[in-house]
Image: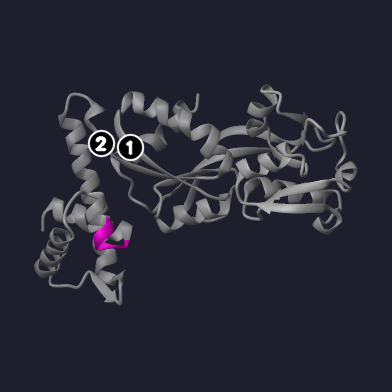
């Protein structure tokens, strides 16, 4: 058993596929299979169950995966300690992001991080806040940046930015000035899906004002923040979104922003990671310096 075999093994686990792992690390599929077979012979255990076209980790494979992550991290730490500078660090950081962080926060953070660690590459997976949290829990991303906090003892949340929500309307809308939530019930409304942090905050506000969704004139639901804004730009409906997301379009005079009376709830965007997951050196550096990357 050597470190390269363990590295190949972790890639097969993460991709759940020999062929995709081979493509990721620029090896042939037969070479990847040989490494896994050598590990299995060396340890005298089966690491994967082959079920049709799928591969599933055995209990021994699950234990080895955790040890492999720790050993590979220790190797990275040794390399970092020996080399004169940290700029030699290279590797992939996998981030799950909800809509607003994915569009407005992560590009800035990635730029700052790569100024110090230029060999880092990133894979950004954008989805709703709830799905981001699920991906952090199941280990398919290294960490997430999202707009909602969920109770789970495995998750650690680091507050990043605080902001509030605003009403946006097209330039053709007749809505003027600050509005009450009751004023909006007769207007066609575009709503984010139920797993988004924005939707969660809106539902809390509606409940506080004893208003149900059935009282609203919802004409469309969308999972994508950019799509929601486009509905508003086309004057199909109005929407409540992050002020950060609205600001760019307001500054370009493409839409109008309105404050909502008594809607003073603020929310944080958080970086979230699974405390039981062993992070790569690069991911660890990103998490530890997260508040610096967003400044």
Q: Which mark is residue 33?
A: none
Q: Does the magenta stretch include residue 18?
A: yes
Query: Mark 2 or mark 1: which comes first in sequence?
Result: 2
Q: Position of 41 compared to 9: left or right?
A: left
At which x and y percent is residue 185? 87, 48
At which x and y percent is residue 183? 90, 42
Measure how far apart labels 2 and 1 are at the Cα level.
8 Å
Marks 2, 1: nearer the viewer: 1
* Magenta segment boundaries in residue numbering: 16-20
Q: Residue shown at 14%/62% (left/top)?
A: 30
Disc 1 secondary structure class: strand
Residue 136 makes an appearance in the image: yes
**Disc 2 designates what residue?**
90
| CB under 8 Å between discs 2 and 1 | yes
Majority SS type along the magenta span:
helix
Q: Which of 110 and 173 is in front in this view?
A: 173
Q: Is residue 36 above or below residue 129?
A: below
Residue 67 makes an appearance in the image: no
Q: Position of 176 compared to 105: left or right?
A: right
State which quadrant residue 86 falls in.
top left
Q: Nearer the viewer, residue 39 or 219?
A: 219
Q: Does the magenta stretch include residue 128?
A: no
At which x and y percent is residue 60? 24, 69
At which x and y percent is residue 176? 87, 30
Quarter of the image where the N terminus is located: bottom left
**Disc 1 designates what residue?**
121
Q: Residue shown at 50%/24% (left/top)?
A: 295
């Amino acid at each position: 058993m050597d470190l390269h075999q363990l590295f190949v093994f972790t890639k097969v686990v993460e991709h759940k596929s020999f062929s995709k792992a081979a493509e990721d690390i620029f090896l042939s599929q037969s070479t990847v299979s040989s490494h896994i077979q050598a590990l299995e012979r060396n340890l005298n255990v089966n690491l994967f169950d082959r079920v049709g076209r799928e591969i599933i980790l055995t209990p021994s494979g699950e234990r080895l995966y955790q040890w492999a992550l720790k050993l590979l991290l220790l190797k990275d730490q040794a390399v970092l300690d020996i080399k004169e500078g940290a700029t030699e660090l290279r590797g992939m950081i996998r981030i799950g992001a909800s809509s607003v962080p994915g569009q407005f926060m992560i590009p800035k953070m990635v730029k700052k991080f790569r100024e110090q660690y230029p060999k880092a590459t990133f894979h950004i997976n954008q989805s709703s806040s709830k799905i981001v949290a699920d991906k952090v829990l199941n280990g398919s991303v290294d960490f997430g940046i999202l707009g909602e906090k969920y109770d789970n003892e495995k998750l650690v949340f680091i507050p990043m930015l605080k902001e509030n929500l605003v009403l946006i309307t097209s330039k053709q809308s007749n809505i003027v000035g600050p509005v009450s939530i009751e004023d909006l019930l007769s207007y066609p409304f575009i709503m984010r899906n139920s797993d988004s942090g924005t939707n969660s905050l809106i539902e809390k506000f509606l409940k506080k004002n004893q208003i149900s969704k059935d009282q609203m004139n919802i004409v469309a639901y969308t999972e994508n923040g950019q799509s929601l804004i486009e509905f508003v730009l086309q004057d199909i409906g109005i929407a409540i979104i992050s002020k950060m997301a609205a600001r760019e379009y307001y500054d370009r005079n493409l839409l109008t922003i309105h404050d909502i009376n008594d809607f003073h709830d603020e929310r944080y965007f958080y970086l979230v990671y699974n405390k039981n997951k062993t992070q790569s050196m690069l991911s660890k550096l990103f998490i530890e310096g997260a508040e610096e990357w967003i400044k």
